[in-house]
Image (tube, grey):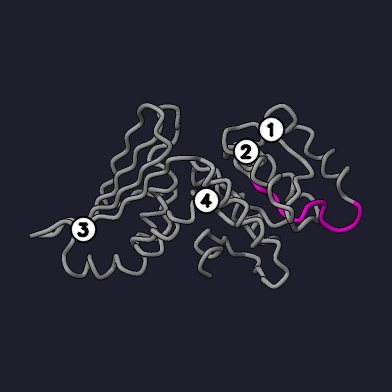
Amino acid sequence: IGSSGRLGTLIDAEFKSEPSLDIVARLNRKNLKSISTIFKKQSTTGNPFDVIIDVSSPTASKTVLSRLLKTDFQIPYILGCTGWKETQFKVVQEYAKKAPVIFAPNFSPAVNLLLKMLSDYGPFLKKWGYQPVVSEIHHAQKLDSPSGTAKAILEHLGNGRTQQKKTSIPVHSTRAGRIIGTHTVEFFGAHDLFCFKHEAFDRVLFAKGAAMAAKWATNPSHTLKKSKVYSMTDVLFG
């Protein structure tokens, strides 16, 4: 879903290079309304797809998830779009009650390693009196601010669910030029500064991460639980 967008196009190309992955349907703005027809066309018995990857928008995602909730399908859902409002995200949580959901504001393996490092080591820095500050820079066309990755960073710094809620940790957002994405977490101490930083040079890394998530979600050796919203850190390190 979101197949005609920048990331959707790259995911399409990445899957074509993966023998174990095959895209059987593509949804975008033009054919989103025909989703019910596509479900019927693909379905014989059981789920019509092994997994759904959604890199569209919260509005489009809500449309698809609402339709899925009216079916008996239990299709693992990989959600890669950001900019969710709290009221919108309820449909994600509702769908997670019937099928596994992987919510990935950022598919980059290195970014998710950064998130794990913040979870593991951030508490030590805060215990020692360091003050975290988050900064993110993206291209001028990016609509949501702060970015979904910045919100995920706040979650892993111990602020709980902050994809919609406000936080006490300072967050600085910049929208300029064609910058794909730069995220910096600085820990300011009384006598020094400790810094984590990730900078994306090519969006293809997000497509590769999406492929990793698809393989993980469809691996028969993984018993995915319902009523749980998974993350890319579960995919990579769980």
Q: Position of residue 33 (x, y in %)?
A: 75, 32
Question: Disc 2 and disc 3: Cα gap in Å?
Answer: 36 Å
Tell me what residue is drawn at x 66 percent, y 40 percent: 13
What secondary structure is found at the residue carrying circle 2?
Answer: helix
Q: Position of residue 15 (x, y in %)?
A: 68, 47
Are the residues at dot 1 and dot 2 in contact (C-beta closer than 8 Å)? Answer: yes
Q: Which mark is residue 107?
A: 4
What secondary structure is found at the residue carrying circle 3?
Answer: strand
- Select label 3 or label 1 by which is in front: 3
Give the residue pinned by disc 3.
194
Question: Disc 2 and disc 4: Cα gap in Å?
Answer: 12 Å
Task: Name which of mark 2 and mark 3 comes first in the sequence.
Answer: 2
Tell me what residue is drawn at x 50 percent, y 43 percent: 82
Q: Quadrant of residue 141?
A: top left
Task: Name which of mark 2 and mark 4 comes first in the sequence.
Answer: 2
At label 4, which amino acid type do we have?
Phe
At label 1, which amino acid type do we have?
Asn
Give the residue pinned by disc 2.
8
